[in-house]
Image (cartoon, rainbow, N blue to C red):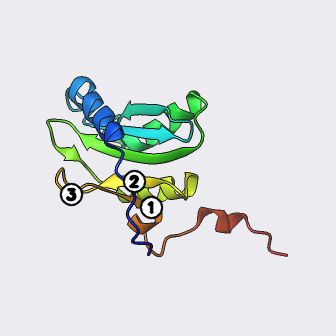
Amino acid sequence: MNTQAHPVDHELVQAAADVAGTRCQGDNHTMAAAARARDGRIVTAVNAYHFTGGPCAELVVIGAAAAQGAYDLETMVAVGDRDRGVVPPCGRCRQVLLDYFPALRVIVGSADGLRAVPVADLLPESYVWADHQLDAG
């Protein structure tokens, strides 16, 4: 596990908090995520809660980023509605983020102790999606 901390992108945290505060209303949208692309753009999104297991905000931001041509995400953060602050990604999101962006940093922790950590640190001993694509010969 790589324990090296990276600087926290406070502008990114604020972008997610702004979306959570203005767009997350009701039970369908309770989380917002923001990601910074390599070119500096910030992409935001909200979750789409549904009893069948709708996508988390982190997954929606991946699609929104791709739709905007931002394929190289460097840092991501999720923030809960009702001033819940930064919320770490769930297990499914950790795996997807690692698969799509193995060098991604994820902002985690509480308001007085935020830190940006490599996504691999959030999922030690992880399955590597590319393993199933290796040539057998």
Closer to the eye: label 2 or 3: 3
Give the residue type at disc 3: Gly
Look at the numbered disc 2 and give the secondary structure of its residue: strand
CB-based contact (under 8 Å), mark 2 and mark 3: no
Q: Neighbour class for label 3 at 10 Å: few (<14), some, many (≥20)?
A: few
Position of the N terminus, as image quadrant, is bottom left
Q: In the displayed structure, would residue 12 be above or below residue 88? A: above
Mark 3 or mark 1: whose residue is earlier in sequence: 3
Task: From the image, tell me which residue sits under label 2.
Answer: 106
Residue 71, by quadrant, is top right
Report x, y in % for residue 105.
Answer: 44, 55
Between the C-alphas of marks 2 and 3, the distance is 14 Å
Q: Neighbour class for label 1 at 10 Å: few (<14), some, many (≥20)?
A: many
Report x, y in % for residue 125.
Answer: 47, 76
Q: Is residue 87 left or right of residue 77?
A: left
Look at the numbered disc 3 and give the secondary structure of its residue: loop
| Residue occupying image coordinates x 27% and y 42% | 79
Mark 2 or mark 3: whose residue is earlier in sequence: 2
**Residue furthest right as drawn:** 137
Task: From the image, tell me which residue sits under label 3.
Answer: 113
